[in-house]
Amino acid sequence: MDMKKIRELVKIMEGSTLTELTVKDAETEISLCRQGSPAAPIQVTVPAAAPAVPKAEEDETVLITAPIVGTFYSAPAPDAPAYVKVGDHVMKGQTVCILEAMKLMNEIESDYDCQIEAVLVSNEQKVEYGQPLFRVRKL
C-alpha cells in the first residue's frame, strides 16, 4: 500500500468519530487507532514487510483486555519498574498491570504463558471495559 492511500485513510478517520480502523490487502495490513476522544491524535501502525505467516501462527497473537473500567498503572509504585515490557515472557497468573477502580487496586494477571508484543495503553491512562491493554503471543 502506498503512502497516498495511507494519508487518505488518516483523513477519513480524522473526519469521523471512528476510534479504530484496520485495512488489509494482499501484502499489507494498516491499523489506525485513536485512544480517547475523537480529537485525540491518530496512531498509525504499519507492520514491516515480512513473509506470509501461516494461519496457525497468526492465531497465537491475542489481546489482554481490561476486565473493568479504571486507571491503568504499569507498575506497583511510581518509582518501581513496570510489571512487564515489550519482549518479556509472562507466565500464567503473573501480574501484568494494575487497574484502579473506586480507590481499589486490582492486579490484572495473564490467563496464559505468553510474550508481550505491545503495550497498548500508557501509564495512568483511563481505560474502558474490554479495551485492549496488551498484545501478546501465546507460548
Image (cartoon, rainbow, N blue to C red):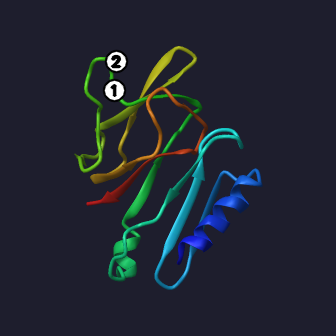
46 left or right of 78 in image? right
Percent position of residue 7, x then y: 62, 65
Q: Residue furthest bottom?
A: 26
Which of the two discs, 1 and 2, sits closer to the camera?
2
Q: Are marks 1 and 2 in contact (CB under 8 Å)?
A: yes
Residue 17 position (above or below residue 126): below
Distance (Cα) linking label 1 and label 2: 7 Å
Residue shown at 35%/79% (left/top)?
53
The residue tagged with tag 1: helix, strand or loop?
Answer: loop
Percent position of residue 27, x then y: 46, 82
Q: Of 66 and 13, which appears nearest the observer?
A: 13
Which quadrant, please, contains the C terminus? bottom left
43 left or right of 92 in image? right
The dot on residue 78 is 2
The residue identified by callout 1 is 75
Residue 106 position (above or below residue 36): above
The dot on residue 42 is none
Q: Quadrant of residue 54?
A: bottom left
Q: Quadrant of residue 58?
A: bottom left
Q: Of 29 and 107, which appears nearest the observer?
A: 29
Percent position of residue 112, x then y: 32, 51
Residue shown at 42%/59% (left/top)?
62
Label 1 sits on what residue type?
Ala
Percent position of residue 23, x then y: 59, 71
Q: Residues within 10 Å of mark 1 (few under 14, many from 20)?
A: some
Label 2 sits on what residue type?
Pro
Residue shown at 36%/83% (left/top)?
52
